[in-house]
Amino acid sequence: MSEHRRKPPQSQEGGRAAARRGQSGSSSGRRAAPRGATGSPSDSYGSGFHGPGGEEPSSGGRADARRAAQRSTGGRRRGAEPAGGRRGGPSGPPGRGRGRPEPGKKRLIDYPRTGKYGWQRWVPSWKLVTGLFVGFMGSLVAVAGVGYAMVGVPKVDETATAQNNVYYWADGTQMVATGGETNRQIIDLSQIPEAMRWAVISQENKTFYDDSGIDPKGIARAVLNMARGGQTQGGSTITQQYVKNAMLNDQSQTISRKFKEIFVSIKVGAEEDKDDIIEGYLNSAYYGRNAYGIQAAARAYFDKDAIDLNEGECAFLAATLKGATYYDPAGARSIDPTGATPEANSRRALNQMQDTLDKMVEYKHLDAATRAKYTTLPAWKNPRSNTQLSGQVGYLVDLANSYVITNSKETGITQDKLQQGGYSIHTTFDKNKVKELETAVSKVQKANIKPKERPETDTHVQFGGASVNPATGAIEAIYGGEDATKHFTNNADQTGAQVGSTFKPFVLAAAMTWGVRDKDLGSSQAQDERTIVSPESLFSGKNKLKIKNYDGTIWKNEKGEEWLQTNDGQASYGTPPNFKIDLREAMRESVNSAFVQLGMDVGLDKVKEAAQGAGLKPGSLTGAGFPSFSIGISDPSAIRMAGSYATFAASGKQRDPYSVQKVTSQDGVIYTHKTATKQAFTSKVADNVTDILKTVVEKGTGTAAQLPGREVAGKTGTTDGNKSAWFVGYTQQLSTAITMFRYDDDETKKNRTFLEMFGTGGQKKIHGASFPAEIWHDYMAEAMKNLPKKGFPDPQPIGEVVNEDPLPSPSPSVTESEKASPSPSPSPSESEPEPSPSPSDTCDSFFGCEDDSGGVNGGGDNGGTGEASPSPSPSDSGDDTRGNANGGNFFGGSSG
């Protein structure tokens, strides 16, 4: 055998080789220990397996040697082997046991256990188990402490405070909730019934006022439920639900979110007042029917404010918090056709409601006698859409919003705040009157306006209207157009449509208030020397009347040209040669020439002052520098016209029209309207104007507006070019203005204009006495049906008869009870207009018609566009162009 494969000599001392040799030397395979041997196995092992006499110790094999070594050293250890290898040598014990501690040294964690053998070595001691448990719990406490310290109370999420504005009719019923994506109105705890709070607490979290914000048992149930594959629900306190609804954007059902919810809930429970928490929860919870918060829920189910809920209704709403899909008595078949039927939902809701009431009694939050009253479901309302702005509602909401913002100094609500929502806006609108006005307009429109049959004349026809209470100024009804979602301009508000002859009562009021100026005095003295006019005062009703200044000089325009005022149908009134008629007849027949001259004698500045005093806005009035100002070239809104006539109905007391009675928020009432009354005219002046306007309805141009058994005063109006027509009238309880016009409101066109109404509705010409008066009559007949019949005050004598002839007139003046005197050219009725004049009577294309005296006729133009009329229309009003050099624009006429 080669040298390099020869095994090295084996050590003859100790180790496994010695043991093997000891074993092989025995014929029986094992040698018993010599009798009388006194050395212990450990002693022998420690001395290299040599007994006291130098003999080899008795050996039970490798196991005996190992046990002996363990008893001696306490276990194996590394680093004790000789440098030559694992086997023992002369310098140390055998190197079998690695990792054993030095003799006498204890381990920090005795595992596997020392001194134990087999499976017992791997069973941890009670000390180790206790230590690990204490360490684990300590770690949890530490983690919780760090988590609690690090988490803060989050701000309430914007979605939890997102609200809309709720609008109410005058009777307190809800009109619409709109202005935001969330149907919520946050209210203060004082506005939430105690029964609602205790119903929720009794059913969901009876220890609410005592707990720390979490329920450990509930959390354990939730965790167990999740471990079984369910959702982490069922363990939430009211505080946790409030945190989840109002503070956490993440609504997922995960362990991490649940722990976050717990930490935040503990923090909120410790730092926030319990009343604030229950208030926040009830305002943020979802009750079904798109209702977030208790106020929206009260309206959605019972159409009442939360504060008015009774104990049974509170218990019912607490039941809906379980999930409205299955607790709304109306059912939710669209979500669950079989499980959410009205019958099944009603049964569940009743059971839950009864259970809640029983718990309220059990926990001493409700007495048994009160509880006994509520054994059936409360009378709930059917679900309805509460965000529709179609029909008239959109116009009403816009009008209310405009009022709130315009009066922000009083309301404290800016446009930005209004858009943020949260306001309950109580309007002045009467639900029945709004419906009745819409019905009256629709009836006339459907019966007469046929755009398919008459596209050239019946397209773009618009109606508008408004009713104002003279006693308060409250706007009780408006008609803004066919549909607020289709026609965006509110026709009850300012549209630019001229008011025509409905402006004449302001001229009369000015004449009775300030009087006409003395013709014999200079301009400065004449302002102080005036004569108050009476209804019997006489003015010329001649057609193509040459208009004069108050001092008798001929009025001329900037080009030095004289002006001739025309009447409707080119008719003259009164008996030749002077054509004088009194102011009562002039108003009854809507004679332009008489009122244009009266306005000049009073002073157009005073006429404007009277109009503003009655309630018209300065911005809607044209400059008062032209004679035609007195016959309605201004364009106030229907609301303002109704309000200004209401001033006459109220014997001269002026009250601005308003649409909002009260505004509330979660802080309570933040605005209440206070009616401000001004004495615009004396009662003597106002009552005389009313008495004259009564004759217009009784036997003048406004007979279509008569209401049997009621006194009505009013005035018709038709403008130049027949581009708008009005009827404004009133009883003592209600003033209403109706307007009609054609207006091309196509926003794709750059120059949108008012259009003529010749032929509209199948009529030759639209007068205020036709469709507007018909609508006024139909509406007021319904609106006044249940109101007492009240007459107007008897007028007191006023003023002096001016312009009275020293000699008897060829035709006697008209008295208050007499009709107009016979006239060679009687006035045509507004409902039966005469044809347009022949070319020989027509106006110059720029300045109008010229008669024998060489004056310029104020025939007017087509209105609003600045285009001259090639021939005067049968109307007698000016158009709506202001400051234009066109003579017709300045001096056109208006008619009744």
Image (cartoon, grey):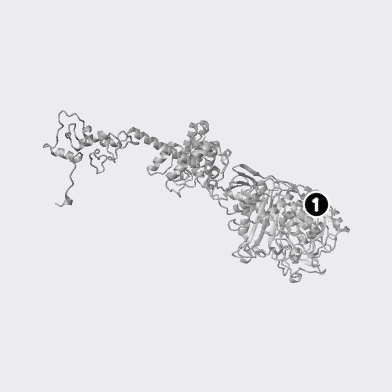
Q: Is residue 856 above or below residue 632?
A: below
- Screen quadrant of the C terminus: bottom right
Question: Looking at the image, which is closer to me, 624 or 221?
Answer: 221
State the image coordinates of residue 66 (x, y, percent, origin top left).
22, 37
Question: Looking at the image, which is closer to me, 859 or 830?
Answer: 859
Q: Amino acid at mark 1?
A: Thr
State the image coordinates of residue 277 (x, y, percent, origin top left).
53, 39
- Residue 867 is left or right of residue 855, and the answer is left
| Residue lying at 58% horizontally and 46% vertically, measured from the top left | 422
Q: Secondary structure at mark 1?
A: helix
State the image coordinates of residue 80 (x, y, percent, origin top left).
27, 39
Circle 1 Cα neighbour tier, 10 Å, few/some/many (<14 / 14–19 / ≥20): many
State the image coordinates of residue 275 (x, y, percent, origin top left).
54, 37
Question: Looking at the image, which is closer to me, 815 or 5?
Answer: 5
- Residue 459 is left or right of residue 342, and the answer is right
Asked whether the viewer can see residue 240, the reply is no
View extreme (left): residue: 27
Q: Is residue 458 above or below residue 515?
A: below
Asked whether the viewer can see residue 12, the reply is yes
Residue 545 lies in quadrant: bottom right
- Residue 459 is left or right of residue 313, and the answer is right
Residue 543 lies in quadrant: bottom right
Q: Which residue is mark 1?
A: 513
View extreme (bottom): residue: 840
- Count of numbered badges drawn on the protein: 1
